[in-house]
Structures are given as structure tokens and as C-alpha cells.
Image (cartoon, rainbow, N blue to C red):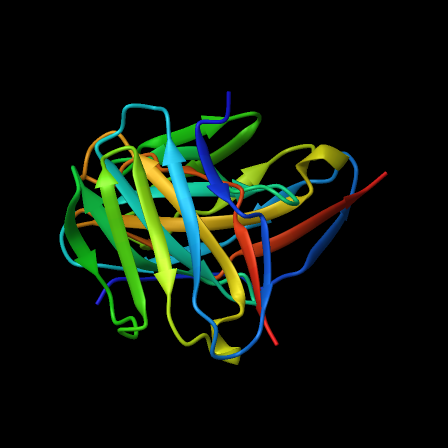
Amino acid sequence: GDSVTQMEGPVTLSEEAFLTINCTYTATGYPSLFWYVQYPGEGLQLLLKATKADDKGSNKGFEATYRKETTSFHLEKGSVQVSDSAVYFCALLNDYKLSFGAGTTVTVRA
Amino acid sequence: DTAVSQTPKYLVTQMGNDKSIKCEQNLGHDTMYWYKQDSKKFLKIMFSYNNKELIINETVPNRFSPKSPDKAHLNLHINSLELGDSAVYFCASSLRWNGEKLFFGSGTQLSVL
């Protein structure tokens, strides 16, 4: 079946540091890929998405590129802020079913 | 205006009790979902309804029964609660049943004592 594997957290960074969260997937066919973010005490919200190979999703300074050859969709941000502290989920949509990774907790310190 | 609202936010109850969680969306979406998030933040889909019809029913105990009176509401009823049911339950909706761009509620923290 489909699955998503993302790097374990927690990840703790200083403000203005570079953030990378690795995500790899296993799926048949041509899935769409997503990053969702969950701020403390809130539900998940869509951060960015990519629907085909080599697509780059971007939002709020975050970027991720759909790499079919490495089955990866790593999330990056060049300079994080305290407000980026959250849990980040990589997700895969295939056959109308959305599968999530285990989530990576990111804490950014001032 | 809250797009996807679920109540209650916190629910503390004893083993063996029956409880319900309500969810409403005002986005005009066709599809609604229930997800369970465990203590390690892992999210797992439980149910999905499209226009009041059940379309996804994952391996969930029969004690869990979703009910969708109309496409704006999806309630979750749980019978004979067990310790292992303690988790955060999220309701979500999407415009269509293709699963793209889910909008989540803020969750219901269920604690079974």
C-alpha cells in the first residue's frame, strides 16, 4: 500500500536558520504530494502541494520539489521564524485517499 | 467564521461510556472526514462521506459509528469507550471527494479514564 516516511523529530532551530524536513514516499501510479502544517492547538492546514514530477510547491517561504526519481518531497525554508514552530506533515494523495506521514515537530527559538 | 467546527474541544469520560463528537462545515464542501491522531501525532483516516454517502471506512471498531444527516454535518458516535480510544479526533472537509486540499477542524481531545 501507499506510505509516507518523514524524518523524525523533534527538530529545534534558532531563528533565521535553514530548515529541511525529509519526506519520501512509496506509491503506485502518479500520486500528488502535500505538506500540511499544524500550529499548536489547531487543526492541520495545507501549506503547499505538487501534483506531478518536477513540480515545485511554495508558500510562506517554504518550498518542496516533487522528485519522482528519488520518490521524495523534502520541505525547505531558508530562514525560519519563531512563528514557524509547528508540526509538519508530509502527505500523499493516490486513488482519492490521503495518507499522512508521522509528522515532524519543529521548534524555533528566538 | 469558523470553516470547520467541531464540538466539544475536550471530552473526558469513563471507560464504558458512550459519547458523540459533532462536526459542521460552512464551506459548501461535498466531502467530510474523521481522522484520529494518536499521542505520537500520527494521523489515520477513519471515515469519509461524500454527499452523505459513506465512501471510506477504514479498519475501525464497530463501536465507532459516523452519521451524516446532511452534507454539512458529520458526527461521530463512540460506544463502550476504551482506554485506547484516547486521542485527538479531527474532522475535515474538502470541496470534492478527490481528497485534495482538506480543511481541518481544531480537534477534539478525548481522554478515557
Q: How many marks?
A: 0
Nearest the camera: A98 or A110?
A98
Quarter holding the C terminus of chain A?
A: top right
User: Quick check: can you spot residue A75?
Assistant: yes
A87 versus B85 height, above or below: above
Looking at this view, name the residue that lies furthest to the right.
Answer: A110
Position of B109 with respect to A32 (left or right) is: right
Q: Point out residue A11 in the picture as x, y percentages from the top left corner.
A: 68, 56
User: Quick check: can you spot residue A81?
Assistant: no
Position of B50 with respect to B4 (left or right) is: left
Position of B85 with respect to A80 (left or right) is: left
Looking at this view, name the residue that lies furthest to the top.
Answer: B1
Q: Point out residue B96 in the picture as x, y percentages from the top left corner.
A: 20, 33
Image quadrant in which you'd find residue B60: bottom left
Q: Point out residue B62 in the picture as x, y percentages from the top left corner.
A: 26, 73
Image quadrant in which you'd find residue A2: bottom left
